Amino acid sequence: MFFIMGITQGRKSFDYNQMMVCEHCGSYGRYQVYMTYMCLSLFFIPCLKWDRQYYVQSTCCNTVYSLAPEIGKRIARGDNIEIRPEHLTRVQAGYKSRVKRCVIYFSQTGTTRAAAEKIAEVKKADLVEIRPERPYEMSYLKTVLTSLKEIFTKARPELAMEMPDIQKYDRILIGCPIWCGLAPNVILTLLDVLNLNGKHAAVFTTSGATKPMKLAVKLKKTYPEIKWHKPLNANDMTEDEIRNWM
Ligand SMILES: Cc1cc2nc3c(=O)[nH]c(=O)nc-3n(C[C@H](O)[C@H](O)[C@H](O)COP(=O)(O)O)c2cc1C
């Protein structure tokens, strides 16, 4: 009596569909999930499987991630479960180059700066601070009066900063506090100087309570040639919101 046996490596794909914005190439894509395993066969019949490893491949640029085993096992069972960034460890970068982003922000008292730094870190973007030539007073009331004056006179306060080379970037993320319901006029100076016509851009804001939509609509009206994306309320943003934005 003799046995025909063999040890082979197998691969099984799962029927899984989750849309995502790829953190590697910045495009929309889907996650494809598969499992690799070792298999012992007797008389060509698979008898024993071990060393199961779960992987995710993005359809946009073929980046490969290893998937947390507990999530992989649930997907293998057919559970409808969401794959989150913390479930993934990148093992092979995809073929497309990453979208290049620049975060440009103005902050008077530091809140928007903290938000800008967080966004730049999550998005792996360059970070540029907007600095007015004449810094605003630190007194709230005086700044409100200056801001109102700038709004009514359509002022463009001078900037004292080196302008980024905007052609290098695919997406421009502009951050500011909301002042009197609007973007501080230094943002208008920046948009006049940079000329973002045809570029993808969006604003993120911090504020006491006001949401950024009205401000974003106004900017879209004033600079219609820019390809504006939806604004982000940076007051209480989560990391997932940042990842899925722009
Ligand atoms: C001149 C001025 C006007 C403001 N207007 C508003 C407003 O209309 N709505 C609001 O919710 N917060 C308003 N705030 C609060 C700021 O938007 C908020 O404190 C912001 O997070 C400050 O950001 P920063 O620390 O980056 O300067 C105003 C603050 C100042 C100084």
Image: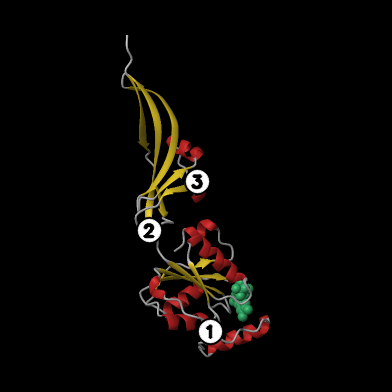
State the residue position of label 1: 160
| Res 53 → quadrant | top left
Secondary structure beneath label 2? loop
> Distance from label 3 to label 1 (Cα)?
43 Å
Secondary structure beneath label 1? loop
What quarter of the picture does the N terminus occupy?
top left
Give the foreground label among 3 and 1. 1
Q: Please give the name of the residue rendered at 54% of the width and 88% of the height, measured from the top-left corner.
A: 152
Q: Please give the name of the residue rendered at 38% of the width and 27% of the height, measured from the top-left corner.
A: 39
Q: Which amino acid does label 1 sit on?
A: Ala
Q: Which amino acid does label 2 sit on?
A: Ser
State the residue position of label 3: 87
Sequence order check: which comes first, mark 2 or mark 1? Answer: 2
Quadrant for ligand 1 reads bottom right
Q: In the drawing, does residue 241 fall left or right of residue 46?
A: right
Considering depth in this image, is 151 or 98 the residue closer to the camera? 98
| Res 141 → quadrant | bottom right
> Distance from label 2 to label 1 (Cα)?
35 Å
Q: Can I make out residue 209 in this image?
A: no
Q: How crowded is mark 3: few (under 14 residues within 10 Å), some or many (20 or more)?
A: some
| Image coords of residue 57 (percent x, y) | 38, 46
Considering depth in this image, is 44 or 184 the residue closer to the camera? 44
Whether 162 is drawn above or below 61: the answer is below
Q: Which amino acid does label 3 sit on?
A: His
Sequence order check: which comes first, mark 3 or mark 1? Answer: 3
The outermost residue toward the top is 1
Q: Can I make out residue 167 in this image?
A: yes
> Distance from label 2 to label 3 (Cα)?
20 Å
State the residue position of label 2: 27
